[in-house]
Image (cartoon, rainbow, N blue to C red):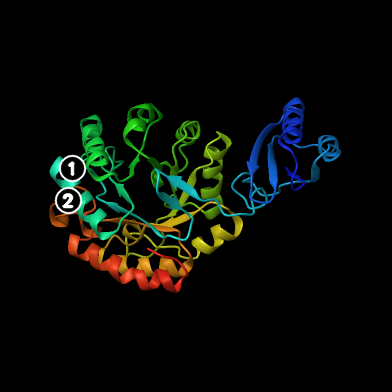
Amino acid sequence: MVIIMKPGTEETVISKVINKVEELGFKPHPIYGVINTVVAVIGDRTQEAMDTLQSMPGVDRVVPILRPYKLAGREVQPESTVVRVGEQVEIGGRVVVIIAGPCAVESREQYLATGRYVKAAGAHILRGSLYKPRTSPHDFQGLHEAGIELLQAAREELGMPIITEVLDPRHIELLEPVTDVFQIGARNMQNFALLVEVGRTNKPVLVKRGMSATVDDLLKAAEYVLVGGNNNVVLCERGIRTFETQTRNTLDISAVPVIKRFSHLPVIVDPSHASGEAWLVPALSKAALAAGADGLMIETHPSPQNALVDGPQSLRPDEFRQLLDDLRPFAEAAGRTL
């Protein structure tokens, strides 16, 4: 259930309501909005508890939440969430945030070179993972701990926030000092132990939709992070597995407005993994902006033909620069900027 406080209610009164929620054996999640303060209540509701809370000073009304995701839904927070990354980047605002870089960090030269040209082109966040989940155990799995210094070097030289994938709860402490956003990949969307652990951090978390996951599955995965107390969650549509064989996955463009209708969390689109082909990325990127995406995650590599991971879907430097130039009028038409 969610407790909606009356506008202008003093913090001392709100604190008493929160204390009562805990006294009744529930877990409170206060959300301080622009107009109203609401307290999301996690636990098995009873009519007696609802009546008790409804009668408290400052409470406007108590509303049961029927959807399986509680904190991620707009019943709890009607206003759209804006997730702040670093000092300047905001995902969910007027600016369409561009996350760009190689799928995997391969070497100092490759990573820094990519970071320099994506920053110059106008990207906001640099991607690059040290741990890569691969379908075959014989494929390149990433640099692991040996790449930590490369993430740190990129942050120091470029001044860009870094997003990197985390596969194991044991890696969180290792990666936390050198990353600004934890990425939960499609294969780990339902790794609940991992979701719980990133929920205990104060770093923004990007949750990618699983290959065969529904929108409800994605929102319930995000719920695991939110329940842990981390409200800085971004959702990512990256294509789902269907019967189609012409593309790597099928981009579910309708997921963007659907998620925005039912959830306050920002949504970005990954056209690179959705298509698996670099030539398709521009068209899917434009479609994503038209659908209302808050950002794009685009793979690019200085030399795609030599990439150790996902070369066919990675844009060359000139292609990446051209794409961002081409996207600006599309962003403006959608009432956004790039």
**Residue 126 x/y as whole percent:** 30, 48
The residue shown at (49%, 61%) is: 256
**Residue 187 x/y as whole percent:** 39, 44
Q: Is mark 1 on a helix, strand or loop?
A: loop
User: How many numbered marks, from 0 up?
Assistant: 2
Q: Quadrant of the N terminus?
A: top right
Q: Which amino acid does label 1 sit on?
A: Glu
Residue identified by numbered label 1: 106
- Are the residues flagged by discs 2 and 1 in contact, CB closer than 8 Å? yes
Q: In which quarter of the image is the C terminus?
A: bottom left
Query: In the shown orientation, is residue 245 left or right of residue 67?
Result: left
Disc 2 residue crowd, few under 14, some 14–19, many 20+, Cα 10 Å: some
The residue shown at (31%, 41%) is: 133
Disc 1 residue crowd, few under 14, some 14–19, many 20+, Cα 10 Å: many
The residue shown at (29%, 58%) is: 122
Quadrant in the picture for residue 285: bottom left
Between 4 and 75, the one nearer to me in the picture: 4
Would residue 280 be visible to someone looking at this image? no
Between 329 and 214, the one nearer to me in the picture: 329
Q: Is mark 2 on a helix, strand or loop?
A: loop
Query: In the shown orientation, is residue 186 left or right of residue 272?
Result: right
- As measured in the structure, the alpha-carbon distance from the residue carrying label 2 to the one carrying label 1 is 8 Å
Mark seen at residue 307 = 2
Query: In the shown orientation, is residue 316 left or right of residue 204?
Result: left
**Residue 154 x/y as whole percent:** 23, 41
Q: What residue type is labelled 2?
A: Ala
| On screen, residue 175 above or below 263 | above
The residue shown at (47%, 31%) is: 197
Quadrant in the picture for residue 85: top left
